[in-house]
């Protein structure tokens, strides 16, 4: 993304996230993106505390992740999030994970395209976002309106034949 979407989450790679290749295991990329998603919806006004009070939450419907470059122990990473589209119940999101080397070089480590939905946990069905959350989503959409559409969205898996 150029220009880049805002940073919503930062962390360092923990020892328990490494696999026998001595880099972060694929499962933990998803964990980090999920933690970033929790932060995002909290910023939108749909935190765990709000869910406990109202029974309104969010759930992920679909993820598509790419692993662009490896990350290693104690390496700092940051997650950026772009709102691609939304309606009264759903968010189409695009996350990028940037890693930082000891020499200060930043590189794209992974991406995640996601569809998330607002849910009423009492009925276990979809519902519209609460008014305050909708206002926050609309505000983010306006702030990010000039960001270019990422080239990486809408991809499908397949072996490219020549």
Image: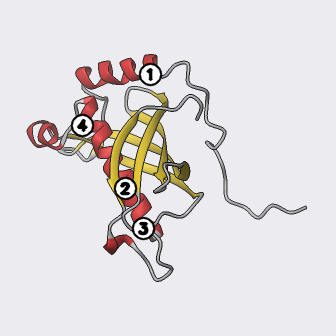
**Residue 32, numbered label:** 2
Q: What crowding class fits label 3: few (fewer than 14 Cα within 10 Å), some (14-19), or many (20 or more)?
A: few
Q: Secondary structure at mark 4?
A: helix
The reply to whether callout 1 and callout 3 are in contact (CB within 8 Å) is: no
Could you say whether the residue bearing mark 1 is in a helix, strand or loop?
A: helix
Type of colouring:
secondary structure
Residue tagged 4: 42
103 or 96, which lies in front? Answer: 103
Task: In the displayed orientation, state which residue is furthest to the bottom.
Answer: 20
Question: Which quarter of the image is occupied by the C terminus?
Answer: bottom right
Q: Is residue 105 left or right of residue 16?
A: right
Using the image, tell me which numbered label, if any, was put on residue 27.
Answer: 3
Q: Upstream in the sequence, badge 2 or badge 4?
A: 2
Q: Is residue 59 above or below residue 1?
A: below
Q: Which one is earlier in the sequence, the residue at label 1 or at label 4?
A: 4
In terms of depth relative to the viewer, which is nearer, 121 or 24?
Answer: 24
CA–CA distance in space, label 2 to label 3: 9 Å
Q: Give the x, y percent position of residue 152.
A: 63, 44
- Label 3, label 4: how far apart the Cα atoms are: 23 Å
Q: Which circle marks residue 7 in the picture?
A: none
Residue 141 marker: 1
Task: Give whichever of discs 3 and 4 has the lower sequence position.
Answer: 3
């Amino acid at each position: 993304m150029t220009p880049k979407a805002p940073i919503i989450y930062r962390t360092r790679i923990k020892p328990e996230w490494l696999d026998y290749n001595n880099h972060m295991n694929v499962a933990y990329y998803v964990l980090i993106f999920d933690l970033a998603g929790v932060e995002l919806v909290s910023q939108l006004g749909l935190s765990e505390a709000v869910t406990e009070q109202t029974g309104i939450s969010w759930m992920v419907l679909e993820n598509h992740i790419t692993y662009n470059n490896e990350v290693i122990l104690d390496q700092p990473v940051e997650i950026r999030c772009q709102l691609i589209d939304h309606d009264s119940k759903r968010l189409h999101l695009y996350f990028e994970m940037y890693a930082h080397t000891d020499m200060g070089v930043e590189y794209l480590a992974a991406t995640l395209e996601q569809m998330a939905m607002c849910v009423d946990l009492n009925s276990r069905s979809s519902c519209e976002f609460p008014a305050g959350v909708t206002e926050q989503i609309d505000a983010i959409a306006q702030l990010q309106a000039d960001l270019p559409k990422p080239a990486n969205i809408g991809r499908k898996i397949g072996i490219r034949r020549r």
